[in-house]
Amino acid sequence: MEKLKRLGGQTVEFTSFPTVIGYAAVVGPKEAEGPLGKWFTETEEDPMLGQESWEKAESALFAKAVNSCLKKSKLTPESVNFIVAGDLLNQCTASSFGLRDLGVPYLGIYGACSTMAEGLSVSAMLVDGGYAGHVIATAGSHFCSAEKQYRFPLEYGGQRPPGAQWTVTGCGAVSLGYGGNIKITHATTGRIADMGVKDANNMGAAMAPAFVSTLLAHFQDTGKTPKDYDLIVSGDLGSIGHALAVELLKKEGVTLGDNYKDCGMLIFDSQTQDTHAGGSGCGCSASVLCGYLLPQMETKKINRLLFVATGALLSPTTTLQGESIPSIAHAVSFETL
Amino acid sequence: MEKLKRLGGQTVEFTSFPTVIGYAAVVGPKEAEGPLGKWFTETEEDPMLGQESWEKAESALFAKAVNSCLKKSKLTPESVNFIVAGDLLNQCTASSFGLRDLGVPYLGIYGACSTMAEGLSVSAMLVDGGYAGHVIATAGSHFCSAEKQYRFPLEYGGQRPPGAQWTVTGCGAVSLGYGGNIKITHATTGRIADMGVKDANNMGAAMAPAFVSTLLAHFQDTGKTPKDYDLIVSGDLGSIGHALAVELLKKEGVTLGDNYKDCGMLIFDSQTQDTHAGGSGCGCSASVLCGYLLPQMETKKINRLLFVATGALLSPTTTLQGESIPSIAHAVSFETL
């Protein structure tokens, strides 16, 4: 039995510091037109990616992002010991079908829009624990397949309430191993939080308590405060969830300042892009991390980042059956070397 | 950087030997009437478990199995550092809704019917790596929610072709830590295999190549042969997949004898229970492992077990879009102390 590598509570402390080797973010045309457009590794002009269905287009996003990540990491599939992947489609088929030809031992995960942080946490433990030389974590989503599955077919032209968010068409992939210049120092795994919110068009409100719960656990376990980070990002709370999170944390005695941002608010300009409360989907935090945040850590414009992806664990069936929306958030702490 | 704890290929070798602390299997009435009926920890007379929908009944199975496992393990939720859980429902809601009040840091996984082996592999690495004192792995399924989601509503009375399998109503949960008398020695993580099978009513044929691929990798990586195990079990290949797997392995020079069984063939009597090719679903291998196999390891009737759960990664959407069925299998090796 080895010495436990955990702090109290929900946080694992990495002793060997697994690092980021490479990363890539592939996004669709709307994301390319947004405020972060110039940052993404690849942008697709055709939201169908030349495929015959939205679901196949989403799978193609995964294949492109992972291949681009492998290339940037100077890795072959044979040298990767695990890929940890997930998405929003029923039975997680976007990731499994998109990556079925890769030949890398495969761990499918589901954390709704928290998937990228869950994948990074598990991957960092697999590297730090000595179970892998290299692991890839990846997550993605597609606006059109998500609308079709969760809401209405696009052709129906349904109106979106102001609290609604816009699922990001995008996929991010990160490879972890040793020798990079961005290390992962901690991972805080979330507990499921359910405050009884039932409005599936206001997921920011449903997810904010999960973000608050994980953030408080992270600070309590590590002894850190918001000032210890250059940037704290939530995954896709959007403008409503962001404001709610700030308020809830203030009640707990934690003041978040200008260093707290939300990936869903960064990726779109809601004024000009008609995205209401902001971006969402597994691909939201994954593309913002891999397209915008990690590149800025590489150039040391950001040196200490807390990445907290948030997920609403609902399904269309649970909503129809009158259930509330359980949510979860996982935090991963990055530092430049 | 620590020394790698892996053999070549796809297999992790545990150096500190995480052990099974406790386990429980809760199943429905049809499973209770089957050949293993007397073995299960708890059997439910009412397939609705007193709930108002099949989905909520499936969630109730998870809550019962995990609580029973905690009790048998003499653990409180506060002393469990992670729960690794998954199921077949869209967005994995059976497990997340069933376990939302538990308060244990939550890692959602999706491996279709391979979920129990994926969860055990990840859990064993989390314990062995020092990230957790105790972890629970759990997986389950429900016949009625699966029929409704994947095939037809029960009320429709659709006929089932002979190759079809019967989704098990059941949930298994295992707690891992140190101090038990059954150790986990190896985990072999599967690659996705897709041989082009498109018949969603013959999943045994779709999954057999994944089982063969993972079994060959396990033997090659560890230097073991089938004779090194008292029992090798596949998850839910059923009678068609079982026969196919034996044939495919023979072509590769590996002869499986009487020590090779399939959980889907063990759990039902297909002659009298009208289950065609056998049981399936995440709950099939999970309940057979936690209800029947681990108790026999505890009494040393089985001392060396290779548990290879198999999963078909399809969805109703991918089948309607003419896709073939990618499959995966993960192997976990147990030994008594």
Image (tube, coloured by chain):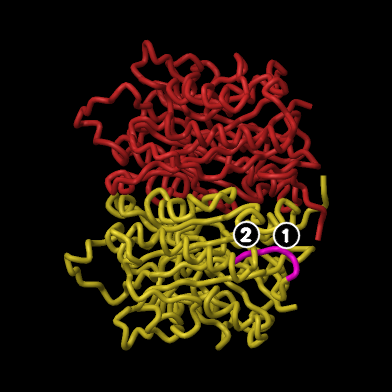
Chain colours: A red, B yellow
Q: Is residue B272 above or below residue A120?
A: below
Which residue is at the front of the view, A8 or B181? Answer: A8
Above-or-below relation of B226 to A237: below
Q: Position of residue B12 (x, y in %)?
A: 70, 60
Whether discs 2 and 1 lie on one chain: the answer is yes
Give the residues in magenta: B174-179
Q: The residue tagged with tag 1: helix, strand or loop?
A: loop
Which of the pair A176/A193 is nearer the observer? A193
Percent across and percent down for residue A229 are 69, 23
Residues at marks 2 and 1, CA–CA distance in whole angstroms? 38 Å
Residue at image coords 23%, 62%: B152
Q: Earlier in the sequence, mark 2 or mark 1?
A: 1
Q: Marks 1 and 2: in contact by CB < 8 Å?
A: no
Callout 1: residue from which chain?
B
The majority secondary structure of the magenta stretch comes to strand
Q: Nearer the viewer, mark 2 or mark 1?
A: 2
Most distant residue in the top direction:
A272
Q: Is residue B247 magenta?
A: no
User: With B143 as the anchor, is A304 left or right in this view?
Assistant: right
SS assignment at label 2: loop
Kindly identify the amino acid type of the residue bearing the numbered disc 1. Answer: Gly
Reading the image, the residue beneath label 1 is: B8
> Which residue in the structure is indicated by mark 2?
B76
